[in-house]
Amino acid sequence: MTDRYVVIGNPVGHSKSPWIHAEFARATGQDIDYGRLEPPPDGFNAAVDAFRAAGGRGANVTLPFKEAAFRYCAELSARARAAGAVNTLVLDRAKVFGDNTDGVGLVRDLQVNLGCTLEGRRVLLLGAGGAAQGVVQPLLEARVARLVVVNRTAARAQALASRFSGVQGGGYELLVEGVYDLIVNATAAGLAGARPPVPARVFAAGALAYDMVYGRETPFLEFARAQHARVSDGTGMLVEQAAESFLIWRGVRPPTEAVLRALRHG
């Protein structure tokens, strides 16, 4: 019997996750069906309840439901607890289990695919929503020298930073001083053709600018490129976090190189 999985988001029609997991299943000999589920903004719990009742085995969770997924779960991994957000649901247990693979996906993409050394680096994280919450602890575990979180609503960045030792958080006024080796955009500004109000001065010589939005040249990346920064979209993070979810569900880690190459080059 084919096991069923979905990606849950709103909107979700653009998601590459069904294709990615189909490729993972083909490469590893797993029999799965992976689709999309787009509940209304207030319909997350009902949609997951129905999918689980129909035999659904697991789900990936994307915008805007990662915090709702955290609240939905009866059991949580340590990294989901640290994040306060869930992007991976395991539904075929007595109690729904939630995990967060965003951070490990980002760190693996940075270190393995992009060859970016994190230890000792100064890191600026833009945004304080579900996407940002999932990556703070993994970045700290990679032994970055400094991590600053900024958000348009300063209180939200401060609240996120306060959950971790040594992390500074606030509004964009924090950027009047300091330069950074890695600037990660975890906001959804690029989806609306906008960019966070980051001054040019924050980019250190040789900095890497990383946008979690994938498959497009966002205004943030265009701006970073104009500052002579190295740039990357979030395609690699998408693939690597998906591979971690696949491992959680199926007990086997799929190879990612061919999938990443196909997404980048068509």
Image (cartoon, rainbow, N blue to C red):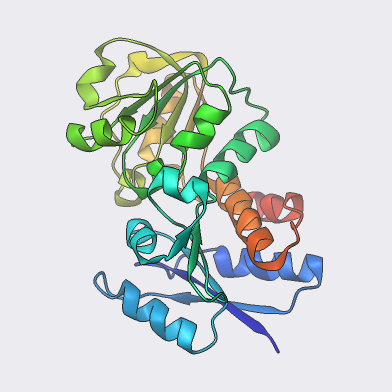
Q: Work out whether residue 115 or residue 233 is closer to the camera in this orientation and state it.
A: 115
Q: Work out whether residue 135 or residue 227 is closer to the camera in this orientation and state it.
A: 135
Residue 18 lies, with reference to residue 137, above or below; the image says below
Q: Work out whether residue 39 or residue 234 is closer to the camera in this orientation and state it.
A: 39
Q: Residue at x 34, y 43 (%)?
A: 187
Residue 189 coordinates in the image, percent (x, y)? 31, 44
> To which quarter of the image does residue 82 belong?
top left
Whether residue 4 sits left or right of residue 123 in the image: it is right
Q: Quadrant of the C terminus?
A: bottom right
Whether residue 252 sits left or right of residue 186 in the image: it is right
Residue 111 coordinates in the image, percent (x, y)? 65, 31
Residue 185 lies, with reference to residue 240, above or below; the image says above
Please count the marks in the image: 0
Residue 20 coordinates in the image, percent (x, y)? 63, 63
Res 91 visible: yes
Q: Work out whether residue 25 or residue 91 is closer to the camera in this orientation and state it.
A: 91
Residue 70 coordinates in the image, percent (x, y)? 38, 58
Res 231 visible: no
> To which quarter of the image does residue 263 belong?
bottom right
Q: Residue at x 56, y 22 (%)?
A: 143
Q: Residue at x 58, y 51 (%)?
A: 241
Q: Quadrant of the N terminus?
A: bottom right
Q: Residue at x 34, y 18 (%)?
A: 200
